[in-house]
């Protein structure tokens, strides 16, 4: 049997200039934190002992916290988000291609700006109020925050040119493709291939969201809907963060790793050919999970090696999994045997 190693012809997707990318990813959260701390220092002498930290739909304060609690929340939010941003930048291939880097920086700069403006504005709203007095937070601040976030996104995208990177490749380009070939399979032989795949990023995101929901329910008295939504969403993300990929005489099947449903099955008569390719989760599919973009879809757990199937309708279906070259070779053999006139079918 030919060597179907997925490494042959594969492209190294590790990003150059990682330190510069990490710095640019952390910078917006540093700037947001410094800006809000500057506002706090400026108005500190005019603030009451208890600060309004939450405002209702009418702009009236309905939740309070001390200075220490507010500063802990402020610093914790920006430090955690900054750390996550840097972690993603270093552990993924966001910055390997220009388009991916633009999207990363635009997203983190917009997120920081959208958080920093309301936090600073809430301090200004508390200025000059007496203890127990309910300050008013004008809701037009949210519209301003959205506008500032849009400007920050453009600024972040422009900063991508500070990092020397190759231009974006065309989606699922042949330069990242491994010639999977085909396994010699007799007409009466039975063969199968099973592999489990998963995403540490989605698992961590799901667990973090579920824990955040529990902590939110414990720390706040703003109702159960938001904490419950966070808890359920986190559990669902964690449940679908792993998948089982199977290739056999029935075709290709991808099923969740922890629950039996839903499953995706592609029959052999719906498949033209299978290949092993190197893909970028962000640049090629716009993220992780079940992704649908023009001309292709897939179960994208991470960037890297993937089994890519050309369907009879001309669209591609991909699933990120190790040893994908072997799976593609077996699938090609099964498809050819299924289509053989000697088989008596089609």
Image: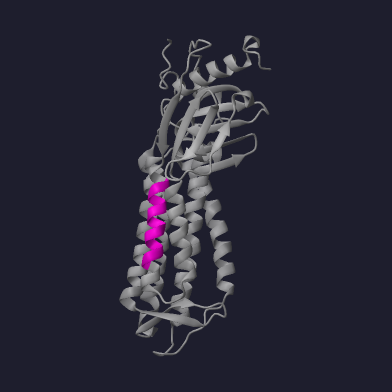
Residue 77 position within the rendered picture, expressed as x and y whole percent measured from the top left: 38, 63
Identify whether 137 is placed above or below 15: below
Q: Nearer the viewer, residue 290 or 140?
A: 290
Residue at left offset 42%, top offset 50%: 238
Main SS of residues in magenta: helix
Asked if residue 208 is among those painted magenta in the image, a careful observer would answer yes
Asked if residue 68 is among those painted magenta in the image, a careful observer would answer no
Q: How many marks?
A: 0
Residue 272 position within the rendered picture, expressed as x and y whole percent measured from the top left: 62, 22
Residue 216 position within the rendered picture, expressed as x and y whole percent measured from the top left: 39, 68
Identify whether 245 is placed above or below 339: below
Q: Residue furthest left?
A: 68
In the picture, residue 174 is in which quadrant?
Answer: top right
> For the magenta stretch, what is the residue range?
202-215
Residue at left offset 42%, top offset 22%: 6
Q: Nearer the viewer, residue 166 or 344?
A: 344
Residue 87 visible: yes
Q: 341 left or right of 144?
A: right
């Amino acid at each position: 049997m030919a060597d179907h190693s997925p490494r042959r012809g594969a492209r190294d997707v590790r990003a150059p200039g990682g330190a510069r990318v990490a710095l640019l990813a952390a910078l917006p959260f540093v700037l947001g934190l410094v800006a809000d701390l500057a506002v706090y220092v400026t108005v500190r002498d005019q603030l009451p002992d208890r600060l309004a930290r939450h405002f209702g739909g009418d702009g009236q304060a309905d939740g309070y916290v001390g200075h220490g609690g507010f500063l802990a929340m402020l610093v914790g939010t920006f430090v955690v988000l900054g750390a996550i941003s840097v972690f993603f930048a270093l552990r993924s291939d966001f910055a390997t291609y220009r388009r991916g880097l633009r999207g990363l920086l635009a997203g983190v700069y917009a997120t920081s700006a959208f958080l920093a403006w309301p936090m600073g504005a809430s301090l200004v709203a508390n200025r000059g109020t007496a203890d127990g007095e309910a300050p008013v937070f004008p809701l037009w601040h949210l519209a301003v925050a959205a506008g500032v976030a849009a400007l920050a996104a453009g600024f972040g995208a422009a900063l991508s040119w500070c990092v020397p990177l190759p231009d974006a490749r065309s989606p699922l380009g042949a330069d990242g493709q491994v010639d999977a070939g085909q396994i010699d399979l007799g007409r009466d032989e039975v063969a199968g291939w099973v592999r489990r795949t998963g995403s540490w990023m989605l698992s961590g995101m799901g667990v973090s969201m579920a824990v955040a929901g529990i902590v939110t329910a414990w720390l706040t008295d703003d109702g159960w809907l938001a904490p419950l939504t966070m808890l359920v969403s986190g559990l669902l993300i964690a449940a679908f963060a792993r998948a089982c990929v199977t290739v056999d005489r029935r075709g290709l099947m991808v099923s969740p790793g922890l629950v039996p449903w839903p499953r995706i099955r592609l029959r052999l008569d719906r498949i033209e050919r299978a290949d092993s390719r190197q893909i970028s989760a962000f640049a090629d599919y716009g993220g992780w999970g079940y992704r649908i973009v023009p001309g292709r879809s897939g179960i994208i757990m991470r960037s890297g090696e993937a089994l890519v199937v050309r369907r009879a309708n001309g669209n591609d279906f991909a699933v990120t999994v190790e040893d994908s070259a072997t799976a593609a070779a077996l699938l090609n053999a099964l498809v050819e045997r299924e289509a053989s006139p000697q088989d008596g079918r089609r």
